[in-house]
Amino acid sequence: MDAIECGIVKLPRVPVADNVPRADMPIYRELWKHISKKMPKKGRGKSGNLDPLSLPVELQTALDALYGHYQKTYALWQEVHIGVPPVFIMVCNNTSTSKLVYDYVSGFYRLGEDGRSQVYHAGRLELFRNYDENGNRLPRPRTLLIDSEQLESGEALDKDFREMAGEEIERFRREMIERGEVEKARKITDQDLLREVMNTVGKEGKLGEPIRCVVSVAMLTEGWDANTVTHILGVRAFGTQLLCDQRGIAAGGTSSAATTTARSCAKPMRSTPKAWQGQLRRRGWTEDELRRRRKGDPENVQIARCVREQTTMTLKWIAERLNMGTWAHVSNRLVQRRKENEKCK
């Protein structure tokens, strides 16, 4: 709620339903407090065998609830022909939890009761499955697991990935050469490809284009800048400060071409360039003239208010473009302007 009130999140997601009725207070409001004692305390290397189907009921129902909303968002994006899927992020407390959650949503194999045969378990969230209905791994994954152990293992990508994503890999190779990384471009490793998939989530024509779900450890603090993120679930102590650190990828950082609510998908907001240029044109200003004005100028505040209402740009973005200092200053000025308008009514 703090993130919403101070304007960090432009299009907020708050718990509106709780299907675990036995608790006195809504569980989803503070999910980690209710499940932390039931989750692995150590990374994969020290936790032994873990069962993805034994996730706490509270976590399973939270996943189902948020995924239900994701399905609706996904369908809306399909209807308006947005070229990439919306992205669901699951941020976990350690590598054991991230692997459990990843297997639970995307599907996995494990030894059967005879100790020899491999038994397939379909992912519980259909749009995030990395296997087809026959248990064959998809050449290009829909769900990505990103943590230190996964990067080192080299098991994240299917053996057919290079063939299916040949065009995107060749484009990536050319980009490496242009950056002067000629030697590295000659032998691109699976780890290089995995990092490029992660770095290009939400970008058309890139390796990360088809990714719908990212399961990670502390991803929000690593500077990841995907702008198609619509849903975030924290399977860890997930407070306002974490949202502050990465407000650019929260709902407020979503690009205007990929709006995140049913309301805005049905009736898209104005694109950021049009809204921005429209405000300058109306005043006869250039961007240089705008930056020379003092940060508390009433006209700057008015432009900030209009851009905030007409686009999905974050307060941080607005503060930088208008040379208005910090996002907190912009937020305070907008609140002050709103109160002044209310007094005049």
Image (cartoon, rainbow, N blue to C red):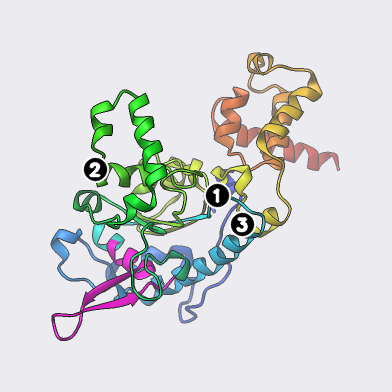
Q: Residue at x 26, y 73 (%)?
A: 109
Q: Which residue is mark 2?
A: 189
Q: Quadrant of residue 99?
A: bottom left
Earlier-in-chain disc, 1 versus 3: 3
Would residue 27 be seen by someone viewing this image from the given angle?
Answer: no
In this rendered view, identify the residue nearer to me: 294 or 339.
294
Alpha carbon separation for disc pair 2 and 3: 33 Å
Earlier-in-chain disc, 2 versus 3: 3
- Residue 223 as seen in the image, left or right of residue 331: left
- Disc 1, disc 3: CB below 8 Å? no
Q: Which residue is mark 1?
A: 251
Q: Residues within 10 Å of mark 1 (few under 14, many from 20)?
A: many
Alpha carbon separation for disc pair 1 and 3: 15 Å
- Residue projecting furthest to the bottom: 114
Q: Residues within 10 Å of mark 2 (few under 14, many from 20)?
A: few
Query: Which residues, given as a range, are shown in magenta?
Result: 99-125
Q: Quadrant of residue 136?
A: bottom left
Q: Which residue is mark 3?
A: 77
In this rendered view, identify the residue nearer to me: 319 or 175.
175
Q: Residues within 10 Å of mark 3 (few under 14, many from 20)?
A: many
- Disc 2, disc 1: CB below 8 Å? no
Q: Position of residue 344 (x, y in %)?
A: 84, 39
* Element on which disc 1 rests: helix
Q: Residue at x 71, y 57 (%)?
A: 266
Q: Amino acid at mark 1?
A: Ala
